[in-house]
Amino acid sequence: MLFIFSTLALAASGGSGDAVFRGAEQAVEFCIGIAGGICLWSGVMELTEQCGLARALGRLLKKPLSRLFPASCRDEQILSALSQNISANLLGLGNAATPAGIRAAQGMAALGSRAQDELCMLVVLNTASIQLIPSTIAAVRSSYGAASAFDITAAVWISSFISLAVGLAAAHILKRLWP
């Protein structure tokens, strides 16, 4: 439907179809350029799980995570998935964080009603994730020729911390309003 509407708008404006093909070409180039980084970091996250680093990271993050996810942190599988998810988000690897986030969410859902608030909290943390190293954003900026791809780091830190604080506050307020 969107394609049909766009074609009609292009015909009505008297424009040429060259922009359509240039846009498609740029989209493919962008996807290929970013796919390598995504594959690399997804592989790194899988290696951390296979070599036991995810479990060690889970032990390191257990105390802070148990304050946010008390029921879920009792299960080692969920704790490991949460740790991987949080770690990937800290490194700015949102796409690599997704599989671990899905595993954590599935584990939480299996816990039943005890973990519904925790599942909402996981969504908040993933949406407002703190990025210490904004690698995906830097990769996008680099693919578009940015002179210094990481010069936005301070802005990412500030916006990440603010969005996380607002998200956590909203989750706690809504939890009290609708128990």
Image (tube, rainbow, N blue to C red):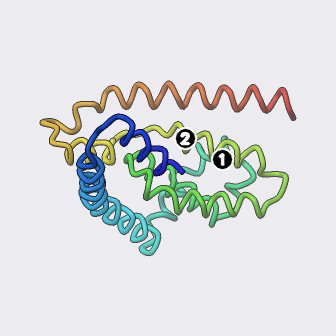
Q: Which residue sits at x=28%, y=59%?
A: 28
x and y percent of residue 103 in the render? Answer: 61, 64
Which residue is under mark 1? 66
Q: Quadrant of the C terminus?
A: top right
Residue neighbourhood size for the residue with mark 1, other residues' Cα within 10 Å, grouped as few (<14), some (14–19), many (≥20): some
Looking at the image, which residue sits at the far left?
147
Q: Nearer the viewer, residue 36 or 118?
A: 36
Q: Which residue sits at x=63%, y=66%?
A: 77
Going by the numbered disc 1, the residue's amino acid type is Ser
Q: Is residue 125 left or right of residue 23?
A: right
Q: Is residue 14 left or right of residue 1?
A: left
Which residue is under mark 2? 127
Q: Nearer the viewer, residue 48 or 36?
A: 36
Q: Is residue 170 left or right of residue 8?
A: right
Determine which quarter of the picture holds residue 117.
top right
Q: Which residue sits at x=52%, y=36%?
A: 128
Question: Earlier along the polypeptide chain: callout 2 or callout 1?
Answer: 1
Would you place residue 52 above or below residue 101 in this image?
below
